[in-house]
Amino acid sequence: MRKILTALWDRNAELVAAHRNLKGFSRDHAVTSVPVIPYHPAAVAFFKEKGAWTEAADKANAAASAQ
């Protein structure tokens, strides 16, 4: 999981250039306060480490996990 997230985070421009379906992933949109499914715990830890995880994301992720 971490290797995938690191590649998306660190090499986003290259990956988007290689395949247009990856265009939707960017650092600015990696964390949402409206998750469709709960974030994996490893993803939460990664995004917290990068400073992208917010309190709103934490609350929304908890609500998504409870469903």
Image (cartoon, helix red, strand yellow):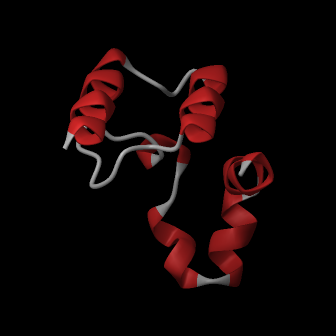
State the count of labels.
0
Q: Position of residue 29 (x, y in %)?
A: 42, 47
Q: Residue 7 at x, y = what percent?
A: 77, 55
Q: Residue furthest top?
A: 55
Q: Is residue 34 left or right of residue 32?
A: left
Q: Nearer the viewer, residue 41 or 18?
A: 41
Residue at left offset 66%, top offset 22%: 49
Residue at the spot x=30%, y=39% of the render? 65
Camera-nearest residue between 67 and 47? 67
Q: Report whether 6 appears left or right of 57.
A: right
Q: Quadrant of the C terminus?
A: top left
Left or right: 2, with 31 as reference point: right
Residue 11, image quadrant: bottom right
- Position in image of residue 21 (x %, y %): 51, 80
Residue under the image location 68 percent in, 48 percent down: 9
Q: Furthest-right residue in view? A: 3
Q: Residue 50, how many percent across, how many down?
A: 64, 26
Q: Height in image: 15 above or below 49?
A: below
Residue at image coords 75%, 46%: 2
State whether residue 12 is above or below residue 5: below
